[in-house]
Amino acid sequence: MIPKLIAIRAEGVRGLGQIDITLPAAARTADPLVLTGPCASGKTRVLEAIIAAKEACGGYGVHPSPTDWFTNPDAGSIELTWERAGEATSRGPLTSRWEPGAPKSSQSTDGALKLALRSFDTSPASWKLEYLHATRHLDVGPAASSPDDQPTGYTRIGHGSDKYGFVRPHLERSGLAAGIATATTLEERGLVLSTQADDPLGGFAKVLALLTDKLRWTGVRMRGDRPACMFARKTRTSHDSIELRELSHAERMIVLYAATIDALGLARSLVLLDTPELCLHPEDQIRLIEGLRVAVAEGQLIVATTSPAILRSVASCQVVVLR
């Protein structure tokens, strides 16, 4: 089952109050829902309210605290309404409701929906939730965790400093594996056709091309005794070869998006993106949103932003202004 979020309702939420947001038809498919408003209007809070309500009804292992979320836990609630993607609408919508004062409401969530909300695997055919929070960054130094560590649902909805620590090891391992496979085939057959090459980072390269035309993935090269993730940076006259650790903050952010979407299989998932304009030039912000729209074409994208460029690039029916 692939759930699609169609409405968000909340009462008594700290820093948010009462909201009632129905996603337009376009935002139930590939087009983003854009949340905007002045400082402290609740943009990030709405994104995190979605996570809290999901976790209360079908969780990755995070247990939201009612006292942290509600001014009066006995009276507050967050309700998410879903539809089944690709299934007959005659069955009606499904609801997941977090109401600490009436705990049975959370327990009454439809079984298939609950299973979808709490399951996590990196298959692109599955649904999952990814929270790209405003303090995200791509660490290009030595890996803080084991290269064998795999992303888990628990880490995907938090703010952990090593949340995207998997990106560089993933690119290095996959890139080296592709190189070894190509070398082996070349040794055995004497020729490797591009159509025969098995590139585990082909998806990453395609998503990167969707998000920017200024950076291209070229593979992993050995620099002495260490692997280096290599890119081609577009200049006015040519392309400069540059490695991951030499990229600008804006370029690293784009790489983070592309690697996360491909490695975690987010094509059919719900992606929550806070402040996408960080580090990016206005024209790059527009390209990013357009690229994400294609990359998660079978999923959903909800964006919190104050970027004039992004707000001008989407239809007014896709924008919710919080006061």
Image (spheres, rainbow, N blue to C red):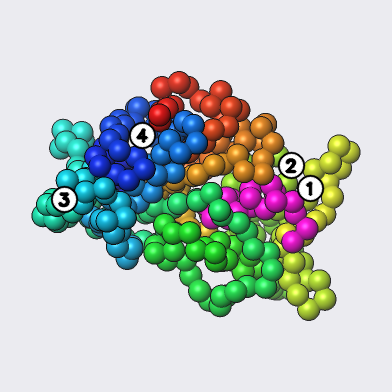
Q: Residue at x 50, y 74 (%)?
A: 149
> How far apart are the alpha carbons under marks 4 and 2?
30 Å
Q: The residue under label 3 is which amino acid type?
A: Asp
Q: Is residue 251 left or right of residue 37?
A: right
Q: Nearer the viewer, residue 306 or 60?
A: 306
User: Which residue is label 2 attached to?
Assistant: 214
Label 1–label 4 contact, CB within 8 A: no
In the visual, does 130 lie left or right of 313? left
Query: Can you identify the residue that label 3 sits on?
Result: 74
Residue 167 covered by magenta stretch: no
187 relative to 271, above or below: below
The residue positioned 43% from the left and 35% from the top of the image is 41
Amino acid of disc 4: Arg
- Image location of residue 132, percent across then percent down: 50, 50
Which residue is at the front of the view, 5 or 194? 5
Tell whether label 2 touches label 1 (CB within 8 Å): yes
Residue at 74% of width from left, 66% of height from top?
Answer: 228
Amino acid bearing label 2: Lys
Judge the density around disc 2: few (<14), some (14-19), many (≥20) Cα neighbours within 10 Å.
Answer: some
Q: How many marks?
A: 4
Earlier in the chain: of badge 4 and badge 2, it is: 4
Residue extent of the magenta highlight? 245-261
Give the residue at mark 4: 28
In the image, residue 104 lies at what x, y percent? 10, 55
